[in-house]
């Protein structure tokens, strides 16, 4: 009866009935914590916790049983309340995946892989020209940088002196060509995949930033991988050859028209399914 009269008083006035604030649950939790904390500290802590636990449990009991206690919270005055929300019945325009950049992952288009192979090949030629120019200017032999590169995989070149590095060696030429060509094509494919995702000027990333990054890796590891190459390398020319590769490969790749990725299409279209609103309507035979 007390509950019904309380709710009736609340409904008649401008207010809302809410549970009465109480600290008994906090006292109950503190007592339970101290009760178990005394098991690893001192028995007095457990006794204090037991007393607080029982007091909190009894006090909490009478807060909710036999009737839950409530208090009335007055409502704001009519003038202070926000205006009522008026429902809008206008239709909602739904976006499809791919329209207006809706739910697209970047990049939404990329260079074809064939452009990476062409860019890698062109970059390999540009890099070889710079390296051979170094050999002719600094060492008087175009074979010097070729033999020096081959020393990374040929033990005979790794132990060669300067005179041997300046001389022609067919085995070293073949090994250096395969190594240089394979790495250049691989880096060209990486460029084709990564350049569309880089912000700003892509030639700056491909021609300057990337060569400086792998030059630093080579500077730190070349002494272990290829000691002869590390002893004879000229880092200024090395950086220039890497920049020539990056700029040439990036320029060739970016000149190719990019292709749109399938993420522009909804899932049903990717799977080849015919669905309303996804597939183009078929033309009737005979029309």
Image (cartoon, helix red, strand yellow):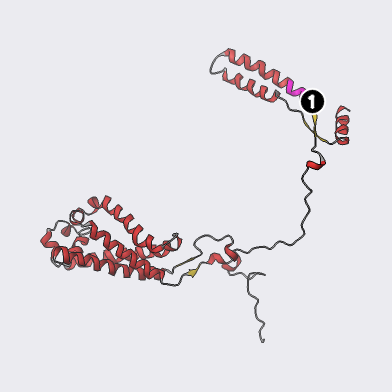
Quadrant in the rendering for residue 228? bottom left
Query: At x 37% / y 61%, what residue is drawn?
Result: 204
Quadrant in the rendering for residue 92? bottom right
Q: Position of residue 90 (x, y in %)?
A: 75, 61
Residue found at the far bottom of this picture: 286
Residue 177 visible in image: no
Relative depth, front residue between 97 and 286: 97
Left or right: residue 268 compared with residue 157: right
Q: Position of residue 118 (x, y in %)?
A: 36, 71
The C terminus lies in which quarter of the figure?
bottom right
Quadrant in the rendering for residue 2? top right
Left or right: residue 279 compared with residue 193: right
Residue carrying label 1: 65
Give the tally of numbered discs. 1
Magenta span includes 230: no
The N terminus lies in which quarter of the figure?
top right
- Range drawn in magenta: 59-69
Left or right: residue 23 compared with residue 9: left
Label 1 crowd (10 A; few <14 / some 14-19 / many >=20): few
Residue 70 visible in image: yes
Q: Position of residue 267 (x, y in %)?
A: 59, 64
- Mark 1, secondary structure of its residue: loop
Residue found at the far left of this picture: 163
Query: At x 77% / y 50%, what residue is drawn?
Result: 85
Residue found at the far front of this picture: 79
Relative depth, front residue between 268 and 56: 56
Q: Position of residue 39 (x, y in %)?
A: 56, 18
């Amino acid at each position: 009866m007390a509950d019904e009269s309380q709710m009736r008083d609340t409904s008649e006035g401008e207010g809302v009935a809410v549970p009465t604030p109480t600290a008994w649950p906090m006292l109950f939790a503190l007592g339970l914590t101290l009760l178990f904390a005394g098991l690893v500290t001192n028995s007095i802590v457990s006794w204090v916790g037991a007393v607080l636990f029982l007091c909190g449990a009894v006090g909490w009991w009478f807060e909710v049983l036999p009737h839950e206690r409530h208090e009335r919270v007055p409502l704001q005055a009519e003038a202070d309340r926000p205006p009522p929300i008026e429902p809008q019945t206008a239709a909602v325009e739904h976006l499809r995946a791919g329209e207006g950049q809706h739910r697209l992952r970047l990049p939404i288009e990329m260079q074809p892989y064939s452009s990476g192979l062409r860019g890698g090949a062109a970059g390999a030629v540009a890099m070889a020209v710079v390296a051979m120019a170094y050999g002719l200017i600094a060492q008087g032999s175009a074979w010097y940088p070729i033999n020096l590169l081959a020393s990374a995989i040929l033990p005979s070149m790794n132990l060669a002196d300067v005179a041997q590095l300046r001389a022609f060696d067919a085995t070293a030429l073949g090994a250096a060509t395969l190594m240089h060509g394979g790495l250049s094509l691989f880096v060209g494919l990486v460029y084709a995949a990564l350049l569309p995702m880089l912000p700003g000027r892509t030639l700056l990333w491909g021609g300057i930033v990337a060569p400086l990054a792998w030059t630093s890796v080579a500077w730190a590891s070349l002494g272990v991988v290829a000691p002869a190459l590390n002893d004879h390398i000229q880092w200024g020319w090395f950086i220039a050859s890497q920049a020539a590769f990056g700029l040439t490969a990036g320029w060739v790749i970016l000149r190719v028209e990019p292709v749109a990725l399938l993420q522009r299409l909804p899932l049903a279209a990717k799977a080849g399914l015919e669905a309303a609103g996804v597939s183009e309507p078929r033309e009737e035979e005979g029309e």
